[in-house]
Image: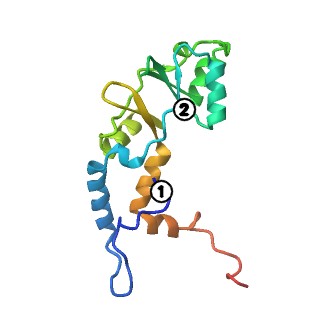
């Protein structure tokens, strides 16, 4: 997924072709949320550990891979999820040693999406559960990726680039001096 807005997403505007009303972008977004698949968001490759691995190995992998979410598998199939939040709440706060197996401190049976599910389905599941990451699994439960809230936000930004890129961080703040002074 590109961080730059997709050039074919919206019509070009110019002096003879004024930008369409904002409501047209909303209609397009609504349609695309229903028709675009999770695969369109290009989920990150799955980073997984077996459920018998120790928490210390998972933490080392999270540090090395610079990720806050690992998928926990058993015989190649997804059985759980381990996040930074799990490390804090289920391991450190509970006083468990880092030699604890993942099976004892992971989030079991996580909510998942299929690569063919709509973006709307993924967003709904993330919103309902308060999740920042959703495992993407194939038809037999093997992980094929992880969908993050960041990827969803970038997808949404593609539909409103002019609004996102032209607004100042604080619209109430006015510069003290004019540019170039």
Q: Where is residue 144 in the image (x, y as percent from the top left)?
A: 41, 34
Q: In this view, does 11 lie above or below 55?
A: below
| Circle 1 SS class | loop
**Which numbered mark, 2 or 1, is in the foreground of this view?**
1
**Model colouring:** rainbow
Image side of residue 5 versus residue 179, left or right: left
What residue sits 33% from the left and 87% below the top?
Answer: 16
Q: In this view, does 118 lie above or below 128?
A: below
Total numbered labels placed on residues in the image: 2
What residue sits 46% from the left and 47% below the top?
Answer: 151
Q: How far apart are marks 2 and 1 (CA)?
A: 22 Å
Q: Position of residue 112 (x, y in %)?
A: 38, 31
Residue 130 seen anywhere in this rendered image of the structure: no
Which quarter of the rendering shows the C terminus? bottom right
| Circle 2 SS class | strand
Depth order, front residue of 5/42:
42
Name the disc covering residue 2, or none.
1
Q: Residues within 10 Å of mark 1 (few under 14, many from 20)?
A: few
Residue 124 seen anywhere in this rendered image of the structure: yes
Q: Position of residue 95 (x, y in %)?
A: 67, 14
Q: Position of residue 69 (x, y in %)?
A: 54, 32
Write down the quadrant of residue 96 in the picture. top right
Q: Give whichever of discs 2 and 1 has the lower sequence position.
A: 1
Depth order, front residue of 49/135:
49
Name the disc covering residue 69, or none.
2
What residue sits 62% from the left and 12% below the top?
Answer: 100
């Amino acid at each position: 997924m590109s961080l730059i807005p997709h050039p074919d997403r919206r019509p070009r505007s110019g002096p003879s072709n004024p930008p369409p009303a904002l409501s047209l972008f909303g209609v397009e977004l609504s349609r695309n949320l229903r028709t675009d698949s999770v695969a369109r968001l290009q989920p990150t490759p799955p980073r997984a550990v077996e459920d018998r691995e120790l928490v210390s190995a998972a933490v080392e992998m999270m540090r090395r891979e610079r990720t806050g979410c690992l998928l926990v598998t058993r015989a190649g199939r997804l059985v759980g999820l381990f996040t930074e939040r799990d490390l804090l709440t289920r391991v450190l706060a509970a006083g468990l040693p880092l030699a604890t197996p993942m099976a004892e401190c992971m989030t079991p049976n996580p909510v998942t999406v299929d690569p063919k599910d709509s973006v709307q389905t993924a967003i709904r599941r993330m919103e309902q559960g308060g999740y920042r990451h959703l495992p993407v699994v194939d038809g037999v439960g093997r992980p094929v990726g992880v969908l993050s809230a960041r990827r969803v936000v970038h997808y949404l930004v593609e539909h409103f680039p002019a609004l996102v890129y032209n607004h100042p961080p604080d619209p109430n703040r006015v510069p003290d001096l004019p540019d170039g002074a």
